[in-house]
Image (cartoon, helix red, strand yellow):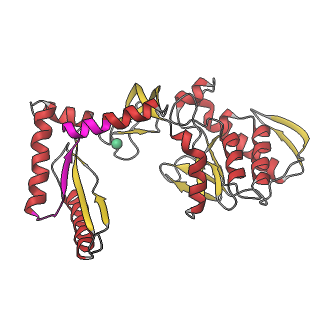
Amino acid sequence: MPERPPYYLTTPIYYVNARPHLGTAYSTIVTDTIARYKRAQGFDVFFLTGTDEHGQKIQRSAKAMNCTPQEFVDKMAAEFRALWDKLGLSYTDFIRTTEPRHKKSVQRLFTLLQERGYIYKGFYTGQYCVTDEAWVDVGPGEPCPDCGRITETVTEENYFFRLSAYQDRLIELYEQAGFHAYHLAEHHATPLGMAPSPSVFLAAVAQRTKTLRFGPLVYTVNLYHPLRLIDEICMLDQLSGGRLELGIGRGISPYEVGYYGVDPATGPERFAEALDVILKGLTEKRLSHHGKYFTFEDVPMEMQPVQRPHPPLWYGVSIPDSKLKGVTLESYRVT
Ligand SMILES: [Zn+2]
């Protein structure tokens, strides 16, 4: 008799800072539908759901209800489970992150990764949105781009996973999987990005791929001398046979540009001028420019990009049209 092939699926493990709602019910009902369909097809289905019971949001919700975080999550997890049972959802197991079996497995995985050198300690300073449990790219005291609530400046010592150790293999898998493009963030002095010089890293990407388009997300223009950046853009476009996507930006973290001694206040003006220089340099044979921040006289532009007049240019914005007065670009990518 043929064995039933295993089939595993899971819902997200839901945050228990609030009671279950239509969104959480929807995900779980969809998962239940797939589980039942697979069972009918003869699969040995393991359908997991559960609750994620950590985070500041939960700590604060517990405080507001005058109970301990554990009492709070016990109550909420029971509500989730009761609702799934009421709806008749056919989950195989319900896991809670505060359960001993979950803690034990996480500790085992963490220890294994640490022994193999994939976990390291680092610092991060940035703006944190407590409601969304997420780091956001805004200045100190500015609101969260997603929910509009005021963010908090947080410096955190934490353990980080060395994803960069897998980057070379990942990039080849992206190409095999048919991805259109790969974008690399530029970060400095933070574990958020372990490839602080995008051009250096992207040169390796160009060598390891044949069809995948790639580019920085984005070049922090104010950290570059514009002539140097033109050279790097041309080099990458040449190395890859014209696969570079040219993303540019002002530098969104005042901390990171601050480490380089760049005054965030001069950012927009210097950025606009540098972009003007870069576009001229990519499209003209000789570069002359007389501005507030840069002066160049008849510089021969020996290298040119493969893609004419220049690689596709785009700029990431959180709110359309908010930041680019006086700068003309071919496309915006709203992030
Ligand atoms: Zn938010």
Q: Position of residue 311 (x, y in %)?
A: 72, 56
Q: Is residue 37 left or right of residue 261?
A: left
In this view, the residue farthest toward the front is: 1
Whether residue 13 appears in this view of the structure is yes
| Magenta extent | 87-106
Could you say where residue 243 lies in the image, as x and y percent from the top left? 71, 58
- Let me know if residue 331 is in the magenta part: no
- Residue 98 visible: no
Please indicate whether residue 51 sits to the left or right of residue 231 in the image: left
| Residue 299 x, y percent position in the rendering | 90, 41
Q: Is residue 156 above or below residue 96?
A: above
Q: Nearer the viewer, residue 187 or 93?
A: 93
Along the viewing direction, whichever of 214 and 317 lies nearer the viewer: 214
Vertical position of residue 189 compared to residue 50: above or below: above
Q: Tell me which corner region of the image, top left, top right, bottom left or bottom right, holds residue 89.
A: bottom left
63 lies above or below 327: above
